Amino acid sequence: MRLVLQLACAASLVVSVACGGSGVAPGTPGGPPIVVRFTHVAADFTPKGQAARAFAELANERSDGRLDVRVFPSGQLFGDRDEIEALQGNNVQFIAPSIGKLISFDPRFQIGDLPFLFSDNAAESRFWDGEAGRALLQSLEPQDIVGLATWPNGMRQLMNRTRPIHTPADTRGLKMRIPSGGLLVDTLEAFGAGASVIPFTDVYTALQQGVVDGTIATFDNIEVEKYAEVLDYLTVANVNSLSYGVLVNKTFWDGLPADLRQILSDAMDEATVLARRLATELDETAMASLKATIDVVELTPEERQQFVDASEGVWTKYTPILGQDLLDAALRVNE
Ligand code: SIN
């Protein structure tokens, strides 16, 4: 399926170029539209999926046929392993990976993965909207990437098939799926568990086949990806937070006519408001619906403190990697 879509996109790129060659540049009033592809790995009806669709609809409507923004959810076009490269190659113009997946550019993108740092979605969004967060996103520009916005997806919880988890003693020996390496490996190891990086679109099968014993995941992904069908225990530990970076290819972005760039930028601002509202609403309702399907452990303050204490070494190791200034900026947004 993914190959077919990639071939179709390559063909439509040829069409755009051909139209340009006929004398009417794509994006010119009365000419063919500029085709803009937005790929992401989450389902269409998640907060990310809905926000991406709203972004596309707003931009298409307001550009009066000059833009044709198309959204490809569920990793149909590119997955975790190739979407960043595809963005840099302008084979796709927008992606929205979880920010920790940008670790290969700079380890500081793991800031949201630091255990028990941000208190909630709003705090992490305040960090990325602030000076330190914006500067970090801007550091992607030499990589031909512009970070336009961040969309939260909630706090990550612990799920597994083996036993209820109340303290780090219960995670000992479990092998857990993580979305990217580095800080998350150290965090799981600090809890006594092992960690394995598995692309998002392969997680359900890996859990079903017992490749790993469990996963860290947000309420949204737990529900939508139906992890409760293959795992028996969910612990609400709020280990860390997941935010997506909405990224656009810089050469494409800079090359757009200014009025179309403004339309996309305004549509992105509105989609961001929607993404943030939906993520927070979902966090408020998801636990109730999950409780109906799976054994849910809500940690007592004493139990949670054991996870916080176990994470101390991770903070010690990552403070110089993230930088004290960045960490201070992150800590301030919780106040
Ligand atoms: C996503 O929600 O887009 C993916 C998150 C993950 O890989 O855990």
Image: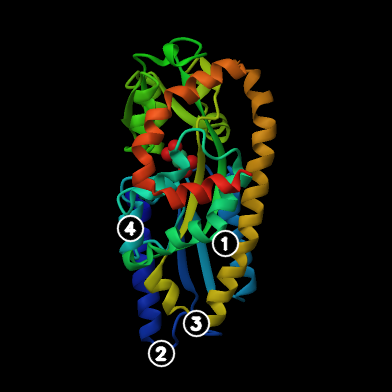
Q: Secondary structure at mark 4?
A: helix
Q: Which mark is residue 257?
A: 3
Q: Position of residue 263 (x, y in %)?
A: 59, 73
Q: Which mark is residue 23?
A: 2
- Tell me which label, 1 or 3, sits earlier in the chain: 1
- Tell me which label, 2 or 3, sits earlier in the chain: 2
Amino acid carrying label 1: it is: Ala
The residue nearer to you, when weighing 228 against 251, is 251
Amino acid carrying label 3: it is: Pro
Which residue reaches farthest bottom? 23
On the picture, is 99 further left or further right than 262?
A: left
Q: Nearer the viewer, mark 1 or mark 3?
A: 3
- Tell me which label, 1 or 4, sits earlier in the chain: 1
Q: Which mark is residue 56?
A: 1
- Callout 3 touching callout 4 (CB < 8 Å): no
Q: Secondary structure at mark 1?
A: helix
Q: Position of residue 136 (x, y in %)?
A: 43, 58
Amino acid carrying label 2: it is: Gly
- Tell me which label, 3 or 4, sits earlier in the chain: 4
Q: Quadrant of residue 287?
A: top right
Q: Position of residue 249 (x, y in %)?
A: 40, 66
> What is the spatial separation of the Cα atoms under label 2 and label 1, in whole angstroms?
27 Å
Q: Nearer the viewer, mark 2 or mark 1?
A: 1
Which residue reaches farthest top? 163
